[in-house]
Amino acid sequence: MKSSLWEQLGQQFSMRWEDLLKASLQHMELVVLSMLLAILIGVPLGILITRMPSIKGWVLGTASILQTIPSLALLGFMIPLFGIGINTAIAALFLYSLLPIIRNTFTGIQDVDKSTLEAAKGMGMKDGQILFKIQLPLALNVIMAGIRTATVINVGTATLAAFIGAGGLGDFIFIGIQRNIDALILIGALPAAILALLLDFLLGVMERVTTPRGLKI
C-alpha cells in the first residue's frame, strides 16, 4: 500500500507540478506579506508598551484574543471587510501573527540589564539613543524568536486560505479531501511542512546570529 501511495504521489506530481509551483509561490506570498505587516506593526507596538505600561494589558490582551479565535472564524470575520480572496487571507494571517512579535519585543526590551541602562543614562544618552543603540540590539534575538514562532504558525494557517479562494498549498489538501485522494493531500501537505521547517531553520540561524556574543552559551 505504501508503494502504491508513493506511485500515486509521483503521478500526481508529474501531472500537477506546474500548479504545485504556482500554489507554492501563492503560499509564500501570503506568508511573506502578512509577516511583513505583522513585523511593521508588532515591533512598534511592543516598543510602545514598554514606554506606556498603562496600555500593555489592552494591547497584549487584544492580540491574545485574536490568536484564540479559530482560524476559519477569523477568515469569516474578515470577508465582510475585504471580500473573498488574498486580501482577506493576508489580513487574517497578519492578525494571527501579532501576539508572538509584540510579546517578544516587549519581553526582550524589558529584560535588558538595568545596570546597562543606568550606565547609558550616566553617559548622557537620551531615551531614543538608549532604545536604538542598546535596548533593541540586545533584544534583537528575542524579537527574532517571536518572528520565527509567528512565521511557522503562519505557514500552517495559510493552508486554510484555500477556503476563501486565496490559493496556496491548501487548494491541493482540500481538493484531495473532497475527492478522497491521499496522494493529492500529500502534494499540498508535504511542501507546506517542508516550507515551515525551512523557514524555521533559516530564522533560527538568524536568531543565533543576532544573539549578542556575551549572551551566547
Image (cartoon, grey):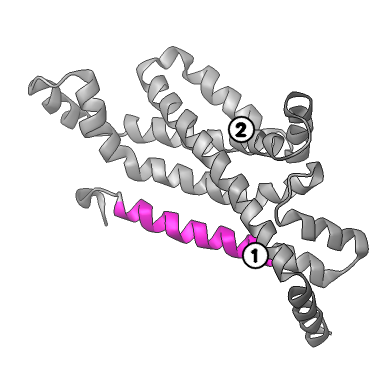
Which residue is nearer to you in this view: 50 or 95? 95
Front position in the image: 100 or 165: 165
Residue at image position (77%, 39%) is 72
Mark 1 lies on residue: 191
191 sits to left or right of 6: left
Where, quadrant-wise, is the C terminus in this rendering? Answer: bottom left
Residue that numbered label 2 is attached to? 95
Main SS, magenta residues: helix
* 48 left or right, relative to 152: left
- Packing grade of label 1 (10 A; few <14, some 14-19, many >=20) is some
Rendered position, 40 above or below 151: above
Residue 28 placed where, x, y %?
59, 52
Give yes or no for residue 79 being in the magenta stretch: no
Q: What are the residue bounds of the magenta stretch?
A: 190-209
Q: Is residue 95 left or right of residue 215?
A: right
Q: Position of residue 164 (x, y in %)?
A: 79, 41
Residues at circles 2 and 1 in contact by the CB criterion of under 8 Å: no
